[in-house]
Image (spheres, coloured by chain):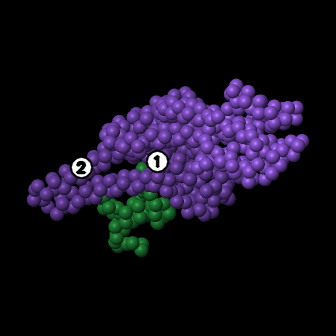
Chain colours: A purple, B green
Amino acid sequence: MSSKRSRKIYKTFRFRLTISFSLAFIILSLLLFAFGYFLLSSSLQANDRTSINLKLKEYTDEYRSGSIDGLKRKVKVDSGSGSLRYFMVRLADSQNKTIVLQQPAEGVNYDFQQLERITPKIQSWIQLKANGEDDVLDIASAQLPDSNLIQIGKGPEEREELLNHFQNNFLEELFVALLLSIAAGAVLSRQALRPLERFTKALGPIIDTGQVKARVPVLRSGDEFEELGVRFNQAFEKIDTLIEGIRASTDNVAHDLRTPMTRLRAVAENALQRDASPEEYREALSDCLEESEQVLRMLNMLMDISEVETGSLQLRIATVNINDLATKITDLYRGVAEDRNISLTFICPPELIVQGDQERLLQMLANLVDNAIKYTAAGGRVEINASAGDNSVLLTVCDSGTGIPPEDVHKIWDRSFRGDQSRAQRGLGLGLSLVKAVVMAHGGTIDVESIQGQGTQFSIHLPAIPVD
Amino acid sequence: MRNAGRIVSKTMILEHIWDYSFDPQTNVVDVLICRLRSKLDKEGVQKIIRTVRGAGYVLKA
C-alpha cells in the first residue's frame, strides 16, 4: 500500500491513459478543424468568384446599353446601397489607362496604379497583391464592344471575416471539449483500471501475511479481467493445495522421524551414564544402528517422493519382461506371504514385454504387492495378473484384504494420506503416490476398485511403447 | 561366500539378489534369512548365519 502512495501521479498508467485519450481527441479535433477550414475557405472563394463574374456581366450589360455615363451612374447607385462594399470596379481604355476606378469601401490598401501595367487577360484571373499584406484581390476582366476594358475585383475581406468567426468559435469549443475530454478520459481510465486496483488490493494481504487463502473478486463480466481474475484464483488455489500438501507431509515426516531419533538419543544417553560392560555397549550401539537405519529408510523414501513430485523422475527406458518382473517380486515376497498364511500367485504370459524403466517398474509392483500383503489378513490371497492388450499391457494386483472406504478412495494417491487403520503400520503413506507417479511417467493409467471387507484391485495400463 | 566374515546389510542383499534398490516396507529380507537358516539347520549346518543387530547379517567364515 505504501508503494502505491509514494508513486508519482505522472508515472501511473491511469495518468498516461487519460493523457492519451485527450491527445487523441485533440489531434482528431484539429484535423477536423483543418479539413473544415479548408473546405469552407475554398467554397467561399469559389462563391466570391461567382459573384465577381455576375457583377462583371451586370456592368458589361449596363455599359452596352448606357455607355460610360450609365456605368458611372450604376457605380454611384451601387456604392450608395452598399452592394459594392468589397468590390473594385475599373474601366480602362484600349491602352489600359484607367477611366473610371471605384475602390472597395473596406479592406486593405491596394496599388491600383499597377493594374495599368498588367496586361488584362480575358477569361482568366488577375491577382493583385495588397501593399504590405498577404491579401489578394481577385480580378476578372471583360472586353467591351468599343475596345474599352472593364474589370471587377473582390478582396478576401468578406470571407476572412466569416473564417475568423468560424475559427474563434471553434477555438472556444475546442477548449470546452478539451476539458470534457480530460474528464472523460479520467473517468474512462478509472473504469478500465478498476479491476486492476481490485487485484492489487487482494494481493496486499497475501504479501503481508503469506496467506494464500485470499481470492481476487471476480465479476461475471465476461471480459478479459474476469479471465485474469479466474486464472489468478486458480493459481492461488493450486499454490494453496501444494503448500497444504507440503505442510502436511512435513508434519508427518517430522513426527515419524522424531520417534526413532528420540529413542536413539535415549539409548546413547543411557549407555553413557553408567560404567557398562563391553557387551552392554555393543547392545546400545546395535540399538542406535537399528534406529538410524529406520531414519535413513524414511529419508530415502522422501527423496524418492520429492524426485517424483517435482517431476524430475528420469526413466531409463529399456525392454522389460513383465514375467521376469513378476517372478522377482513373488520370489521376494513369498516368504512374507507364507509367514502370514497368504497365497501369493501370478499369472503372466512368458514373453510379455514393455518399454520402460526396469527399476522403477519393479519398485511400482513391489509397492503394490507390499501394500496388498500388508492389508490382507491370514488365509487371504494376493494375485498378480498380466495380459497383453492392443498396444498396451494390463497389469492388475488384487487382494482379498480390508478394502478402502469409499470416501477415501480418491485420497489414496495423496502423498500425505494414510488410512486410519494404517496409521499403526510402518511407512510414510508415500508408497501409492510413488506408484502413481511411476505409472504416469510411463504414460500409463492406474485405476483402483475396492469393496470394503472384500478386497482391492489396482489396474495399470502401460503403453507397449511409452510416450515421452 | 565371497563376503564371508563381512557384515552384509539388508539393502545390499536386496540389491545383489533382486536388483532391487529401494527399501521394502515389510521385513522381506528377515523372513528370507529366517527360512534360509531353518533350511541350513535341517542340513545340519548350524548357526552359520549370524545376525548383527541393526547392521545386517554375517556369514561365519
Q: Is residue A325 above or below residue A89?
A: below
Number of disc labels: 2
Please identify, in this view, whether the residue under mark 2 or under mark 1 is nearer the observer.
1
**Spot occupied by residue A163 in the image (x, y as percentages of width and height):** 63, 35
* Screen quadrant of the N terminus of chain A: top left
* Callout 2 amino acid: Arg
Give the label on residue A431, or none.
Answer: 1
| Percent position of residue A207, x then y | 35, 41
**Residue A289, quarter of the rendered image:** bottom left
Q: Nearer the viewer, residue A17 or A412?
A: A17
A59 shown above or below A362 = above
Q: Does A431 sit left or right of A2 as displayed? A: right
Q: Which of A261 and A243 lies nearest the eye of the viewer?
A: A243
User: Residue at 56% of width from left, 33% of height from top?
Assistant: A168
Query: Callout 1 environment at 10 Å: few (<14), some (14 to 19), or many (20+)?
Result: many
**Res A285 seen here:** yes
How far apart are the two marked residues, 2 and 1, measured between alpha carbons? Answer: 25 Å
The mark that comes first in sequence, 2 or 1, is 2
Q: Position of residue A68 (x, y in %)?
A: 81, 36
Secondary element at tag 2? helix
Checking the image for residue A13, the label placed there is none
State which chain disc 1 sits on.
Answer: A
Q: Is residue A207 visible?
A: no
Q: Which residue is mark 2?
A: A263
Above or below residue A389? Residue B37 is: below
Q: What residue do we see at 66% from left, 57% from top?
A: A465
Side of A313 relative to A159 (left or right): left
The amino acid sitting under disc 1 is Gly
